[in-house]
Amino acid sequence: MEVRLTDLTKIFPSRDKKDKSEVVAVDNFNITIPDGKLVGLLGPSGCGKSTALNLICGLETPTKGQIFFGDTEVTNLPPEQRGVGMVFQNYALFPHMTVEKNIMFPLENFKGDKKLTKEEMKAKALEAASLVQIENLMSRKPKEMSGGQQQRVAIARALVKRPKILLLDEPLSNLDARLRLQTREEIRRIQRETGITTIFVTHDQEEAMSISDLIVVMKSGVIHQVGKPQEVYDSPVNLFVAKFLGTPAINVFKGRIDKGGLYIGNEKVLDIPDTAVMNGENVQTDGRDVYVGIRPEGFILDEAGPLTCKLDRVEVMGRDISVVSFHDAATDAGTVCVRSIISAENDIDENEDTVKFSLKPAKTHIFDAETEHVLRFI
């Protein structure tokens, strides 16, 4: 089922007696989520991800805008008539019910032609439990299960009524690291097997990038970029998106473009064309102050390299090593280190005071210092 949001906006009144300004949680969302895809809503805490999900589900009423499931507008439909399945962060299981009864609960609310017999409900509950591989736990109660198992029960309960759309609100945040990895792989497997359009809310960019067909990067209720995870990582539209995606985070330096050269400090690190595209318009680059974002994997250890950093330490990571250094032009210089990921085959003398790098152009992103929009060179 395709999901289409048109000018979707949610404004909450201020609860602060002194500050009466309204809170815009979702600001003019315009997006089409393709049928059968898993889409990650990604952004920092408070950016409006969960509010957007609640609007799609029907738990919140939009201030303006429209919501379409396929060709049908559902903006004013109550949640129970939208055909959605919702999985919450805190599982929201009934503690006095068994796994079987928790999964069956949505089916007991069916009325009229959709009403099922007890045997039919049991069969559907077992089918949903098998999908998430907990069919041997049907007689247990939530307190007798691990966090990961409880989350699977919540997913099975959402799937049992065969929803048109599955909504997941930070379903992995209460799990430990290993369980998070295992459960997100299960979510991806289940989504592929069922083909249900799924919207997954998370603040964990690694989580979103690993399982999503598309990611929607948000900040302050506004969509900043939509695309395939690798495309968004490789071609961020602005500095916020570049900084939000990637582990370790992108390294950001203050720089300038002067006479066809990109300078970080007094060092010319790349040749730059005279013209670039910013926000769809051609702009001149000469004399422009910029931010230079370099992905950790964008450094090449080079004794004759143009970028000189003050060496701090080398961290062994197995097949790679992380070179930790400092540079006066780095944003928040002296407090934020520069991390460079290079092959462990490289030999670095940790007794040296400095380390020199060449840069990979494809892993180096240049942003206008005033607008923070990316400059794409032509």
Image (spheres, rainbow, N blue to C red):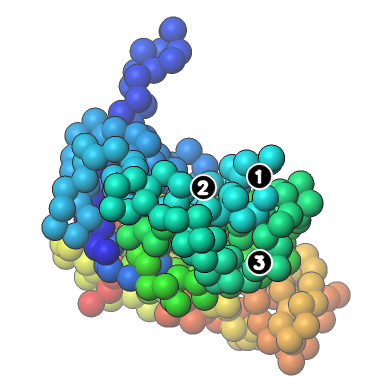
Give the residue at x 59% y 42%: 92
From this viewpoint, is residue 144 visible?
Answer: yes
Tell me which amino acid carries mark 1.
Answer: Met
Residue 234 relative to residue 304: left or right = left
SS under mark 2: helix
SS under mark 1: loop
Give the residue at x 16% y 62%: 281
Q: Position of residue 329 (x, y in %)?
A: 56, 57
Label placed on residue 134: 3
Label placed on residue 17: none
* Placement of 134 over or under 329, stated as above or below: below
Label placed on residue 105: 2
Query: Which image quarter is the C terminus in?
Result: bottom left
- The reply to whether callout 2 and callout 1 are in contact (CB within 8 Å) is yes
Q: Position of residue 118 (x, y in %)?
A: 50, 55
Which residue carries the number 1 mark? 97
Residue 136 relative to residue 227: left or right = right
Q: CA distance from mark 3 to mark 1?
A: 15 Å
Q: Earlier in the sequence, mark 2 or mark 3?
A: 2
Tell me which amino acid carries mark 2.
Answer: Phe
Q: Residue furthest top?
A: 17
SS under mark 3: loop
Residue 52, image quadrant: top left
* Placement of 321 over or under 51, stated as above or below: below
Tell me which amino acid carries mark 3.
Answer: Ile
Residue toward you, 245 or 371: 245
Neighbor class of circle 3 (other Cα within 10 Å; few <14, some 14-19, many 20+) is: some
Give the residue at x 69% y 40%: 96
Residue toward you, 212 or 129: 129
Q: Earlier in the sequence, mark 3 or mark 1?
A: 1
